[in-house]
C-alpha cells in the first residue's frame, strides 16, 4: 500500500481515532528519528540544558507527560 493510500484512509477516520493513531505513532517512533542534538544550535542546546537542570533541581514542578498528552487529546477532539 502506498503512503498516499494510507493517508487517504487515515483522513477518513473520525477525529478521535486520528488523534489516537497520531499518539501511538509518536509513542512508537519518537526515539527512532535523527539525532537532532547533533544539529542543534548552541543557544538552543544551552537553553535545553538549563531547563533540564531546573527540572532536576525541582522534580515536582513539572506536569507528567500523561497529563499533557491527555489535555492535548481533549483539545484536538473538540
Image: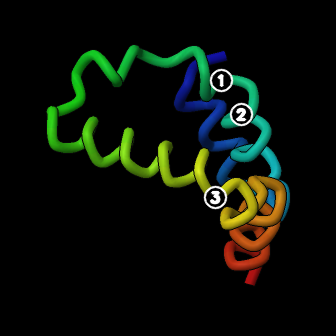
Q: Which of the 4 image quadrants contains residue 1?
A: top right
- Residue found 68% across the figure and 73% down from its top: 76
Callout 3 crowding tier (Cα within 10 Å): few <14, some 14–19, many ≥20: few
- Residue found 76% across the figure and 75% down from its top: 77
Q: In the rendered structure, are the residues bearing label 1 and label 2 in contact, judged by CB atoms less than 8 Å apart?
A: yes
- Judge from the rendering whether residue 19 lies leftward or rightward of residue 50; answer left or right: right
Which is more foreground, mark 2 or mark 3?
3
Callout 2 crowding tier (Cα within 10 Å): few <14, some 14–19, many ≥20: few
Q: Residue 60: which numbered mark, if any?
A: none
Residue 70 pos. (x, y %) = 81, 66
Q: Look at the picture and state if 25 lies above or below 47.
A: above
Cα distance between the residues tagged 1 and 2 = 6 Å
- Residue found 70% across the figure and 54% down from its top: 59
- Residue found 74% across the figure and 25% down from its top: 28
Which is more foreground, mark 1 or mark 3?
3
Q: How is the image coloured?
A: rainbow
Residue 74 pos. (x, y %) = 78, 76
Q: Residue 25: which numbered mark, if any?
A: 2
Q: Which residue is mark 1?
A: 29
Query: Who comes first in sequence, dot 1 or dot 3?
Result: 1
Q: Which of the 4 image quadrants contains residue 68?
A: bottom right
- Judge from the rendering whether residue 14 lies leftward or rightward of residue 10; answer left or right: right
Q: Which residue is mark 3?
A: 58
Residue 17 pos. (x, y %) = 84, 55
Amino acid at each position: 500500500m502506498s503512503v498516499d493510500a494510507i493517508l487517504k484512509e487515515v483522513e477518513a477516520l473520525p477525529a478521535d481515532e486520528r488523534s489516537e493513531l497520531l499518539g501511538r505513532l509518536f509513542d512508537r517512533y519518537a526515539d527512532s528519528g535523527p539525532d537532532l542534538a547533533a544539529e542543534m544550535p548552541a543557544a538552543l542546546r544551552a537553553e535545553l540544558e538549563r531547563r533540564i537542570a531546573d527540572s532536576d533541581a525541582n522534580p515536582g514542578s513539572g506536569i507528567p507527560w500523561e497529563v499533557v498528552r491527555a489535555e492535548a487529546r481533549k483539545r484536538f477532539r473538540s
